[in-house]
Structures are given as C-alpha cells and as structure tokens.
Amino acid sequence: MKRRTEFKCRNPQPRHRRPFLLSHVAMLRQSDNWNEDFASQLGGHSLLSSSRNNDDTKPLPNRVPHHVGIVLDGNGRWAKQRNVPISFAHMKGADRVLQIVPTIQSAGVKCCTFYCFSTENWSRPSQEVMDIFSVLERTLVSITSNINNRGIRIKLLGSREELPQSLLNALDKLEFQTSMQNDDTTEFLTVCLAINYGGRRDIIEATKKIAEAVLNGEISDPDVEINECLLSSYLSTQGLPDLDLIIRTGGEQRLSNFLLWNAAYAELYFTEVLWPDFDEVCWIAALEWYANRDRRFGARNKLEC
C-alpha cells in the first residue's frame, strides 16, 4: 500500500486534469440547492451532466477509483475547537456524508464505504455512543424518504449484534428499498455504511463460516482450494471491488481496523481537515491526487524495465 499525506486540500497545487476538476467544483458551487435539504443533495449530481458529457474535460476512466473508503475522523476535535457538544459535531458529520455522496457519485465512483462506527468505538462514553446511533437513525430515515430513483444502493457492513433495534429497522428498510434500484445507470453508486465493523472481526467470522461449511459438507470436494477468492466470498464485503483509495480525515495516519482484507493495494490519502469540514474541494483534491498515482500492483513500470 502506498502512503501519502496531503495537508492543504483547500488550495491544491496545479496538476494534470485540472480543467475537469475546476469545472466540477465550479458547477457544484453554482447550485443554489447544494447546501439545502437532503433531497437537494442527492439530486445535485444531475447538475454535473453537462461537464461529464464533454470529452475534453472528462477524466480518463481508469484514473477514477472504483471503490473509495472514507474514515470519518475528527468530529470530536471539531466540537472542541468550536466549544459545542460532541453530539452536534456528529450531526454535522452526518450532514457532510449527505452532502458529499452526490459529489462522489458524479465522479463515476461505483462504490464508497463510510466508516461510521467501529467495533472499538464501544469504548467511548455510553452517552456519545447513544448520540451516534441516534444521529445514524435519523439520517437513515431522512435518506429513506428522499432516495427513490437516485441510482444509489445502501449496504450495511458490520455486525448487527448489539445495535439498537430501531437502528436495525431503519437499516433494513433502507437496504430493502434501495435493493430495487436499477444498477444499469452510468452513475450508479453503492454506498456501504460500516457500522459496528472491524476488519479483523470480519476475517475471523469468514474463517468460521468456511469451517462450518466444511463440517456441514458444503465444502467437501478435495479439489476445492481455500484461497483468496474463497475467503473473499465469505466476508461481509462479498461482491464489492477491492479498495482503490482510502481517505482519512483528521490528520491521523492509520487504518484503525478498516477493511483490512480489502485494502491490500489501496492508495492511502491523509488530510488534516476534520470530517465536518471535508467539502467538495477536499474531495476533488483527493481524487486529483489519486489520478496521478502510479498503480503497479507489485509490477514494474514499463519505463523502469
């Protein structure tokens, strides 16, 4: 995995494909509805259709990440800097997710996973944990009311154990509702919410399922090899592409148990910007940085041979 720290996302240095990126940001800012309610947020990607249809400004398809993972870090420090309750910061963080989804969708990304609540987050104060779940539930209800025909599918990653039943009900309703979406559209996006998720736990649960399958005779053919493909099929991320890009806000430079199996060859992008402040300009800076990465997957560049 490649590591890179990027601190000044609000004023990125000029690089390749700037015409597309600048026009992308300009069109987003021209929308009067960009910072309105969630329905406007989800509809915002349609404002970009004219720029995406221009071959002179559209980025090369192989330079857009298929799967982006985002570690939503910095809500606590954001609250402390402004002397506001942490619950308010979590609400602002949830708002930011809603605002950034259409930007991600319009870029041509096919899958995005938001790290909302890890298995380690249970060690936080119980009131904060309750606040996080409350914010998640209200956000899911809002999405359910406004997501029809938006080309978005919602998927839960993580253990359902210990989660409040009301939150599970909201997740189940949203997953079912969006499972009917037509994925043939050009800008179809799968949004994964990693809630009560841990990368190590996911791998452990997958190995348990494989062992059970062997004991039950479901895997009995001696020619069946336990390999990467088999293990991947038992993970909660089954069917999803491997991560191409991981973005972590808040200045920390670690994965924190996030999609460990899937991050084998992900590009790692770190920014000091706190999650509630991570706007479309910051997203474009991360996308631009990724577009200029030399992804070799262990091989050598032709120029090096």
Image (cartoon, rainbow, N blue to C red):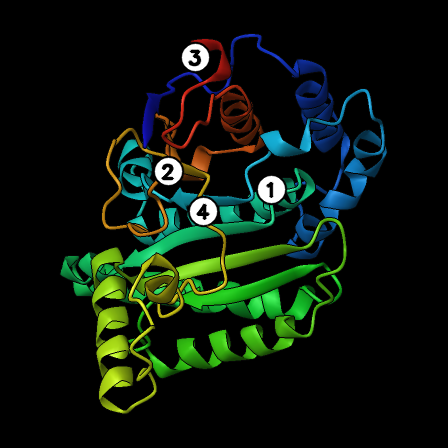
Q: Is residue 285 left or right of residue 167?
A: right
Q: Which numbered tag is attached to residue 104?
A: 1
Say what secondary structure mark 3 lies in. loop
* Mark 2: amino acid: Tyr
Q: CA distance from mark 3 to mark 4?
A: 49 Å
* Mark 4: amino acid: Lys
Give the mark nearest the N terminus, 2 or 1: 1
Say what secondary structure mark 4 lies in. helix
Say what secondary structure mark 2 lies in. loop
**Location of residue 54 in the rendering, given as x and y in whole percent from the top left corner:** 85, 27
Q: CA distance from mark 4 to mark 2?
A: 31 Å
Q: Comparing marks 1 and 3, which lies closer to the viewer?
A: 3
Residue count near mark 2 (Cα–Cα under 10 Å), binned few <14, some 14–19, many ≥20: some
Q: Comparing marks 3 and 2, which lies closer to the viewer?
A: 3
Query: Depth check: 126 or 256 in front?
Result: 256
* Mark 3: amino acid: Cys
Give the mark nearest the N terminus, 4 or 2: 4
Q: Is residue 148 left or right of residue 225?
A: right
* Mark 1: amino acid: Ile
Give the mark nearest the N terminus, 1 or 3: 1
Say what secondary structure mark 1 lies in. helix
Q: Comparing marks 3 and 4, which lies closer to the viewer?
A: 3
Quarter holding the C terminus? top left
Give the mark nearest the N terminus, 1 or 4: 4
Residue at the disc numbered 3: 305
Residue at the disc numbered 4: 92
Q: Which numbered tag is attached to residue 265?
A: 2
